[in-house]
Image (cartoon, grey):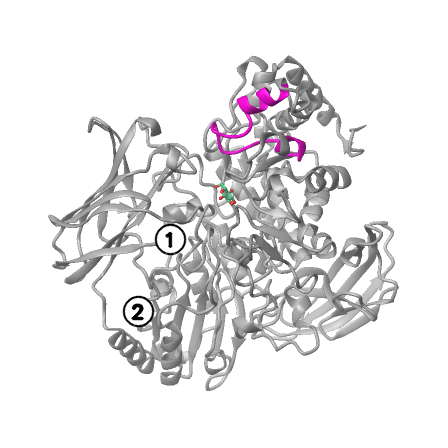
Amino acid sequence: MTVDSNGTVGTAQDAEREAVVEAALGALGLDDKARLLAGQDMWSLPALPAVGLGSLVMSDGPVGVRGRRWSADDPSVALPSPTALAASWDPELARQAGRLLAQEAHRKGVHVLLAPTVNLQRSPLGGRHFEAYSEDPLLTGTIGTGYVRGVQDGGVGVTVKHFAGNEAETDRFTVDNRIPEGALRELYLAPFEAIVADARPWGVMAAYNRVNGVPMTEHAELNNAVLRGEWGFDGVVVSDWLAARDTTAAIRGGLDVAMPGPRTVYGPPLAAAVRAGEVPEELVDAAVRRVLRLAARAGLLAGAPAVVPAADRPAPIDGDALAREIAARGCVLLRNEPAGGAAVLPLEGDGLRGGVALLGAAAREPRILGGGSAQVFPGHVVSLLDALGAALPAGTPLTYAVGADPAEELPPAAGGFVLEAVARAYDGREIGAEALPGGQVQWFGEMPEGVDYDALHSVEIRGTFTPRVSGPHRFGTRGTGGFLLAVDGHVLFEGPQFDPHGDPFEAFFGTPTQRGTVVLTAGEPVGVSLLHLPPKPEELPLPAVGFSLLHAEPEQDAEELLAEAEEAARAAHTAVVVVGTTERVESEGFDRRDLRLPGRQDELVARVAAANPRTVVIVNSGAPVELPWREDVAAVLVCWFPGQEGGAALADVLLGFEEPGGRLPTTWPARLADAPVTRVAPSEGVLAYEEGLYVGYRAWQRAGAPAPAYAFGHGLGYTSWAYEELVALPAEDPALLASVTVRVRNTGARPGREVVQLYAHRSAPEGPATTLAGFAVVTAPPGGAAEAVIPLPRRSARSWDPATRTWELPASPLTLSASTLRVALP
Ligand code: BGC
């Protein structure tokens, strides 16, 4: 054992690795050192063969590993959204997810995963709400710790992101989030702190935004004094993509790596700043040391032992099975009322022979993941329509109707299209091609083989479309640049489309525009072509190509669709309606404006519920939505964005093969107006976190607050539990306040899983009176008891005193509660 300069304890292997790192650092000249701190392209750092260093590759993201190419010809396992993982309240499940992602990373040649996202769900309007874990810092930090441990168990690095204060998307590149010090420490920094302490992450990503006036890529206080100094973080701080803006300020502010490159503030500009005397070379050396350490940990520096040699990696994991397990474990059953007998779920018994009406667009085309950099292309997607058809007892009638179309704008071309993207040079020569699974081209980073961005003149999506139904089909475009759209010989649009947004995600994926309709005949293929002239490289924030061919079937009469669903519901024993959001509602790059389900889905549910008292509603969204009909239906089940196996998991849960294991990681308001934080847009560049500590359930518990639709921690299973005993004993470990055990008994007739939640109550609080203090997941057979052992870390009870700038334990006595049981802290 050795003790390093941060005072942290290292193994002999760490010491060996550090020696190789020091030798490599000593052998590098200033230009190479500066070059190593800048991306050589969109996703990687340069190799430096002279010192035995390989090229380090990074890739998004939380639910899958995209790889260097963002295309369907290199599919990735798509796990459920982070909200679903957090809804399991199970860090061991998160660890499994991390291990699977490490396995995927190795398969794709990736060394560092750009995940997890541990910003808090401050407002339900946050566009990336689905990508974060919870409104609570303890739950976020615990799930994040499990996830990071899992990824690093596999010998792959992480970048815990976005450090810090990146809770919304509006003007995210420039917004100055003014966060009071107490809230910053107790809420927004807390998950990062816990993960640094408990999982020792190899990387952190500096956010786009400012915190209290200073851009996070230049925030010496938070990056150097707090993250490295106080917490002992010894990994790399990498910029969010395009977040590094100033050479001197960034290197002084603690930023190690500027991504992407090569056009960025590190590399040659950094070497020049050192030569001009503006930056001390020691700062560059410190950053290079950390990058070399990261590379060494990942096994990319010759002579240095990888943290996890290939032979010691965890046993292979079946991605489909894990995706299915997480989806079921993340499902939150919000309501399950009797409808003519027992509770409507699980669906079982003789009545089922009367048949199931499955309704809603998302039952056939589920939204399995949120939009933006977290998107991956899975090899297959299981819908509930596919899965339920296969899982229902033989002879059970199953009818399907769309009911309501949630898409308020044209979506990318999908079913019935056979497409490829063809890249051409200025002289018209084809320089590359790629098969497309749908109407989206997203070349961010590596282009198809043979395609060089600087030589690229145009990209054409071309192929055929065979309609499923006859009538006027709608076509459109999305992206920035020049377009020529032709379908079956008709030119529907020729001209430029410019998106005014500064955010690359909005520019590439924003503002779908309908360009015209063509009357087509079912079963008769027609030719389709969308020619795109990308803007000049200097007009774009990134050397990337992103545009889409959009399509929608002939518009159906909305009244007829609703009536058809209503009729199907009336004729069946049970109606299952799947409602959800679209990629235009929940995505990186913009915030939500409301919490409404898009289209006429609310009306669909209301009418189906009136037609059939046994109506089960499944909510397919990554974040809270308003459910105005929730008291009128028999059951409500949230499946979040459930990943590629979502349909199979839902069938398991509906039919009772699996219990819905989730509990809400965030409060669901009845109406947006009731939510504690509804302002996510800055005013004159500033967004004040005026609510301070009162975020999520901390705010809902205040006197006079309206009742939420569903509280933090809420979720039903298929059995019932009695809380029998709560004991808090002094702990030997000085990091713990107490060691708590909770005995629960399964009082129902089915085996079950319970999330035991422990809350701390302060009698004379200066902040929120009640906070989550710990939790554990237990299982028990019918009649059986289980004991949840919950260590209570000091961290979970302390508060930050801005006057002394130190942590304080509460002066007044603490009470702990688990369900109805209470105990005073020893
Ligand atoms: C996102 C990051 C992501 C990066 C690379 C950024 O726009 O904010 O979360 O890792 O892009 O794709």
Q: Amino acid at mark 2?
A: Val
Which disc, if any, is residue 663?
none
Asked whether, in this view, residue 491 is left or right of residue 192, the answer is left
Are discs 1 and 2 less than 8 Å apart at CB? no
Q: Which residue occupies the foreground of this view, 434 or 663?
A: 434
Which mark is nearer the camera, 1 or 2? 2
Q: Which residue occupies the foreground of this view, 357 or 174?
A: 174
Instruction: Check the image and report above or below for 731 versus 710.
Output: above
- What distance separates the C-alpha of mark 1 from that of mark 2? 18 Å
* Range covered by the magenta-colored residues: 250-274
Q: Which residue occupies the foreground of this view, 677 or 559?
A: 677
Residue 465 lies, in percent from the top left, at 18, 50
The CB of the residue at mark 2 lies under 8 Å from ligand 1: no
Residue 562 lies, in percent from the top left, at 30, 76
Of all residues, the one furthest to the front in this rendering is 684
Q: Residue at x 51, y 53 (%)?
A: 169
Q: Which element type, helix, strand or loop, lies under badge 1?
A: loop
Q: Residue at x 34, y 71 (%)?
A: 359
Q: Residue at x 30, y 52 (%)?
A: 412
Q: Which element type, helix, strand or loop, lies under badge 2?
A: loop
Which disc, if any, is residue 402?
2
First in residue order: circle 1 vs circle 2:
1
The residue indicated by pointer 1 is: 381
Residue 700 drawn in magenta: no
